[in-house]
Image (cartoon, rainbow, N blue to C red):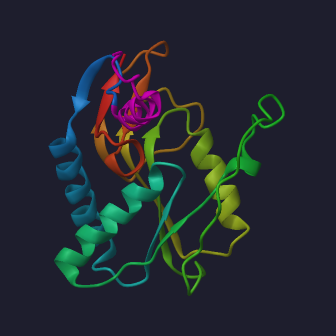
Amino acid sequence: MSAPPPEPPAASAAASVSEPQHEPEGRVVLDARDIARALTRIAHELLERNKGASDLVLLGIPSRGVPLARRIAARIKDVEGVDVPVGALDVTMYRDDLRRQPARSPHPTDVPPGGVDGRTVVLVDDVLYSGRTVRSALDALNDLGRPGVVRLAVLVDRGHRELPIRADHVGKNLPSAHTERVMVRLADEDGVEGVWIS
């Protein structure tokens, strides 16, 4: 009597579930606890700079800027007891390299109720590098309204700016070479959490 055949569908399903949880190769520069501490510090800095949570709006730049913005808003609520509006600002169609790299999938832009006019808008992104993504975000924001103030919060600033753009709130300054890659992974998006450089 022959043994029953193996069940390939279940095995392949298990493999596909575990696949996104592989950690990137390279040196870990921030683990999950480091990220949590950095976001808590950014939340407190925002509250100090803004003298509270009044008129704050957080707009995450997809994809990982959006969950980072949500986490910062949650920390602000823990301190102030206020729900800060959180949205998403897609910059795809405003990028200056769109003609050279046209194959991009836009993400939805989600503006919180009340809009951005006269508000203190904090753009949130995972890595600040050349500054070109932030420039695109400013152009996209300009089409949505006229904020009173725009600030920038990033988890990692790796340097090598090509435009005169500076972050107001930084989780970690990370000196890097042009040839190195900085990879941010968040449990919300990737199933694994940390920042790696390779």
Inspect this view and state whether residue 29 appears: yes
Residue at (59, 31) in percent of width and height:
162
The magenta span reads 1-21
Residue 5: x and y in percent read 41, 22
As for residue 19 lying within the magenta part, the answer is yes
| Above-or-below relation of 192 to 154 | above
What residue is rendered at 64% in x and 56% in y?
90
Residue at 18% over, 42% down: 34
Instruction: Left or right? Give the position of 33 relative to 133.
Output: left
Residue 4 in the image: x percent, y percent? 37, 24
Check the image and report above or below for 188 versus 102: below
Q: Quadrant of the N terminus?
A: top left
Q: Is residue 58 toward the left or the right of residue 169 in the image? A: right
Q: Which residue is outermost to the front?
A: 1
Q: Position of residue 110 (x, y in %)?
A: 60, 70
128 is higher (above) or lower (below) than 41: above
Residue 175: tell me if it is visible.
Answer: no
* Quarter occupied by residue 117: bottom right
Task: Return the x and y of residue 191 as percentages of the image width and height.
Answer: 34, 43
**Residue depicted at x 49% and y 33%:** 129
